[in-house]
Image (tube, rainbow, N blue to C red):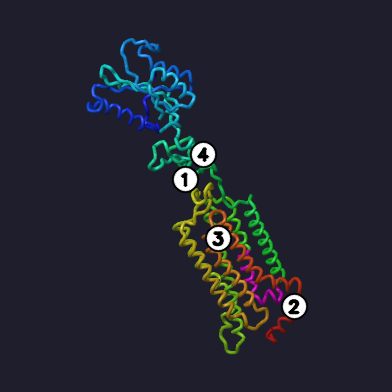
Amino acid sequence: MTLFPPRKGDPDYWMILSFLFATEEINRNPRLLSNITLGYNIHDNYFSARMTSDALLDLLSTGQTNVPNYSCGRRNHFLATVEGTESDISTQISTMLGIYKIPQLQSYLRNSQFYNNSVDGVYLNENGDLESDFDIVNWPLPHSKCVETCRPGFWKVVQEGKPICCYDCLPCPDGTISIQEDSDHCKKCPDDQHPNKDRDQCVPKIITFLSYEEYLGIILASFALFLSITTGFVLGIFIKNLHTPVVKANNRDLSYVLLISLLFSFSSSFLFIGQPRKATCLLRQTAFSIIFSVAVSSVLAKTITVVLAFLATKPGNRVRRWLGKRLANTIVLSCSSVQVVICTIWLGTNSPFPVSDMHSQPGQIILQCNEGSVAMFYAALGYMGFLAAICFTVAFLARKLPGSFNEAKLITFSMLVFCSVWVSFVPNYLSTKGKYMVAVQVFSILASSAGLLGCIFLPKCYIIVLRPELNTKEHLTTKTKDGT
C-alpha cells in the first residue's frame, strides 16, 4: 500500500506522532514487554463495507495474498483492532473478528474523519524484531470533534484545556478575511480593499468625496449659485441707485467692496465641491480666508466710519479730518494684508495637497485635501475671528447712536450671526470626517455670508425698490433733526 506520512500542518500530526513514539518507547524498554515487540498497521476503509472487508482480510492474512487461515512465511500475532467507524461498519468488523476471538476496541475520537476511515491492527512479532513500518492510504485532514467545520470568514481557536481537535470558530477580526474552511488565521485585505459582509473575500473600497452628483453636493451648490446671483442683483441695484441718499449715506464705496467680496465668498464654495485636485487644494482655504478678511474688514471700516461720523457732529471735535475714503481704504487694506501674509507663509512652508484617506472610514477611500499645516489653518481662521470680534464690539457700542440710516444696529446683528456660525463651526468641523467635514465648512461659508448680505443690504434694497418715497434728501434731513 502507498505510504503517506503525516505532515506538520495536519491537526492529528502530534496525536499520530505520540502514538508512534509511545509504541517505539514500549518496544525499546525491556522492563515493559520483555521479548515482545509491538507492531501496527493503519488502514483507510473509505466509508465502504467492501474496503473494510478487504482491510480485515489483509489483517488476518500473513502472506502476500489475502487468504485467511493460511500461514505462509513470517507470522504475526494479531492481538486486537482499534476502530472508530460508523455503527453498521463497526458491526461488520465485529462479525468477522468474532470468529477469530480478536478483541475489537472503539476510539475518544469517534467523530473525527481520520478515525472514521481507519481500521488499525496491533501485532506481536515472534522474532522479537521492531515493526516500525506502517501503511496509511489517503489519510485525510480530520474535522473537529466539537464543531463540524469552520466555514470561510471564521478561524480556528483551540479551546484551552481540551484536546487539540476541539476548537472554537471565531469571526475574523475587522479588516481581515479567511477564504478557506478551517483556517488557522485570518489575513488582512490590501489598503484599497475591505472585507465583504461575510468576511470571506476582499472587495474594492468605495471612493467618496463631496460630489456634484450627490444630493448633498447638489443642495450646497444650488444655494451657492442662488446666493451669488442674489448678491449680483443687490450690487446692480446699488450701482443703478448710486446717487440716492440711502446709498450715499452708507458709504457706497465700502458697500461695493463688501458686495464684491460677498460675491466671491459665495463663489469660493465651488472650490470645496468636486474631486480634490492640487489646484483646488491650494486655492480653497487661502482664497476663502483672504476673501472673508476683506469682507469683515469692510464691515469694520463701515462701523468705524459710523462712529467717527457721529463724533464729527459735535462742536470742536477734530475727527472730521479723519473721515473720507482714505481712512476706509486704509482699514480695509491693512487688515486684509495681515491675512495675505499669513496665507503666503502657509503656502510657502507647508501648503495643502490632495490625499487619499483609506483608513478613517471602513469600506471607503476618502479623497480630500490635507491642510498641510494645521496651525496655519487655524491661524488664518483665528485672525478672521479676531476681526469679527472687534467689528462686533464696535458696532454693539455704536448701536444706539442717533443719525439717519445708522448701520450700527444692522452691523451688530450681522456680526452676531457671523460669529455664531464660526464659533459652532470648529466643534462640528472636528467631529465630522470625509465629505461631511467639507460640507460643514461650505455651509458655514454660505450661512455667514448670507447673514452679512441679508442683515446689511436687504433693508436698504427694501427702501430703494419698494419704498422709494423714503429714499429722499428731505426724509434724510427730517430723520436727522428728530433723531429717530
Residue 287 image label: 3
Numbered range of the magenta stretch: 242-262
First in residue order: circle 1 vs circle 2? 1
Horizontal and vertical percent position of residue 216: 63, 54
Query: Who is closer to the viewer here, 110 or 215?
Result: 110
Q: Nearer the viewer, mark 4 or mark 2?
A: 4
- How far separated are the C-alphas under marks 4 and 1? 12 Å
Name the residue tied to disc 2. Answer: 470
Q: Nearer the viewer, mark 3 or mark 4?
A: 4
What predominant SS class does the magenta segment belong to?
helix
Q: Is residue 255 highlighted in magenta? A: yes
Residue 173 image label: 1
Q: Are marks 4 and 1 in contact (CB under 8 Å)?
A: no
Q: Are marks 3 and 4 in contact (CB under 8 Å)?
A: no
- Asked whether, in this view, residue 158 is left or right of residue 407, the answer is left
Within 10 Å of the Cα at label 1, are there few (<14), some (14-19), or many (20+) other Cα atoms?
Answer: some
Name the residue tied to disc 4. Answer: 200
- How far separated are the C-alphas under marks 1 and 3? 44 Å
First in residue order: circle 3 vs circle 4? 4
Instruction: Tell me which amino acid carries mark 2.
Output: Leu
